[in-house]
Image (tube, helix red, strand yellow):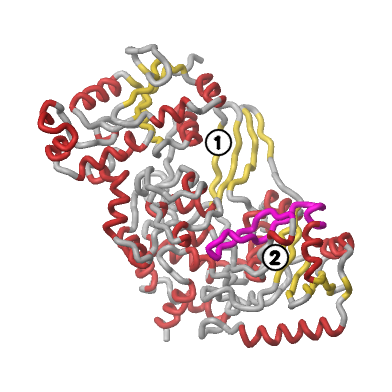
Amino acid sequence: MARPKAAFFDFSCCEGCQLQIANFGESLLDILNVIEVVEFREIMSEKYDGTLDVAIIEGSINTPRAVERIKAIRARSKTLVAIGACATTGGVNGIKNVFPLDEIAGYVYGGNFRDYETIQTMAVHQVVRVDYFVHGCPIYPPEFVAVLKALLMAIPYDVPDYPVCVECKLNGNVCMYDRGVSCLGPVTRAGCNSWCINNDNICYGCRGMVSNPNETGAIDVIKQYGLSIERIVNKLEMYNKCRELNPHG
Amino acid sequence: MAYVVLRKDRFDDFVSALSAQRKVMAPVSRGYNQFEFDEVHSGREIALSYIPTILPPKKYFMPQRETLIQFNSDSAEAVVDFYNMVILGVHTCDLAGIQCLNMVFSERPKDYNYLVRKNNITIIGLECNDYCDKYASCTLMSAELPNGGYDLFITEFDEYLLFHVSTQTGEDIINSVGIFEPANASHMSRLAGYRRQKRSIFNKELPVDSKDIAALFDKSFNSRVWDGLNERCLACGNCTNVCPTCYCFDVIDEPALDLTTGRRYRRWDSCQLEPFARVAGGANFRESRGHRQRHRYYRKFSYPVRKFFRYFCTGCGRCSRACMANIVLKDVLRDLLREHQ
């Protein structure tokens, strides 16, 4: 059986998720046994403009040019995978949407900002249909492999729709709140195996929120721990600002 | 040889000798007044004075993630991964929890993965001489005193540890280590005094007879208490994951990248999570967090009474301690009681 042709494309992002894949080490060889990578700008020079079996997209969409480009990629790809927070939730680029467009464009580009066409930041699924999501900033390598396997078998990959706390407890971690530190694990969807907390860091909410967070309950908890609501909302906005545009794509 | 004595200054020798024989798991400090069972090689690593660990010792009987089958495209082989191990320092609440799980997994069809592992685990209990904290309700659940379920059981005194030897496995350990002395009448009268003293410390935590709790639940299904929990619960699943008697799991087939070999494994699941009762088509049988909390309480205080003739709460207090939203089991029971006063 011919290996499916796969290409990696990047939009507004740091390319760190592609770097994660480039850094897989030996297991990258296993991946290359099952897909044929025909374009991956970060690690190879070849280009490919034919029909793709799999398009793997990193980055969020925030210019009219990017909208056209992602639509063209979608049109020639049988399957499209969004990888990394920028692509799956808008990521940190979504912070742009906190400000009026002209104000933020002027802040970045100065007086000539109108020469640089820009639009509100969107996640990829807010522009074109996405078949698979690999959340995270950066992506969690084992989850990328799990999604790839689901894709090869043509079955859905279910992103866990429960909070990071589940995996964190299974790992026997001391709760960050018991350490006197606030953490976004309770409202952030799992699937990363509580990667950050396992390594003594807090959850920054990079995978986006669970589908049905208990907002009143969360406010109670924030108050009970003597935290300021504003501060937590600020923390949530780091990765979740695009959610209010069109959460379901 | 029902009781033997170990001088405290020999405890380290005991643990070292034990760990030379097999894996020894015991409570260790994780800081922030948090503890967890982990592998130890000396007595100095063990926190003998500890409050219930983050995860109960059930993780050694039914690991968080456990391979059941290895398969390839035309055959499959059942797998049981197990170690010969001693779990040292199990409090009476957790002994009760293990007894509950033993009943569940011994039912037909028997769960061989659980039972094989159980047969390779030796349990050394440890008595509590005081409450761990305000969340415990072990007396209400009759778990404050040893009630079987161990091979050896330790009661701690100032200068020595008194071991109750309950099984042949326990006796073999005592004989193989060889640093114990037989207990005499004065040791036994001190134990009796210790237990009398405990009766003045451990008092039923709520004004209800344990036997009446099941009847309370018979009339509480439509209680407003569950609506209150609906507002507060974050559905994080902490309460069930830390519960010594929760045993729900999900089974997942995980192929390797070659898509011809793979494994079937199970991992802990939780009735508190959004997708737990979601079915094909998107319908959810327990969509509200309040209904999911109610289900958890009924799985502790009502359904198992009909099936196993005992409560599946040991009063360890972990669910209350781990709850971000401060949903406290004792408060929920108290609120239900008040509704029917």
Which image quarter: residue B179?
A: bottom right
Observer-nearest of B156 and B148: B156
Disc assigned to residue B89: 2
Q: Chain of mark 1?
A: B
| Residue B320 versus residue A181 in the image, above or below | below
Residue A5: horizontal and vertical position, in percent? Answer: 42, 17
Is residue B23 inside the magenta stretch? yes
Is residue A181 inside the magenta stretch? no
Magenta residues, start to end? B17-41
Q: Residue at x 39, y 13 (%)?
A: A45
Question: Mark 1 belongs to which amino acid?
Answer: Glu
Observer-nearest of A130 and A14: A14
| Secondary-structure class at tag 2 | strand
Residue B212: horizontal and vertical position, in percent? Answer: 54, 81
Q: Earlier in the sequence, mark 2 or mark 1?
A: 2
Pointer 2 and pointer 1: residues touching (CB < 8 Å)? no
Observer-nearest of B220 and A132: A132
Distance between the Cα atoms at labels 2 and 1? Answer: 36 Å
Residue farthest along the front direction in this orientation: A110
Disc assigned to residue B254: 1
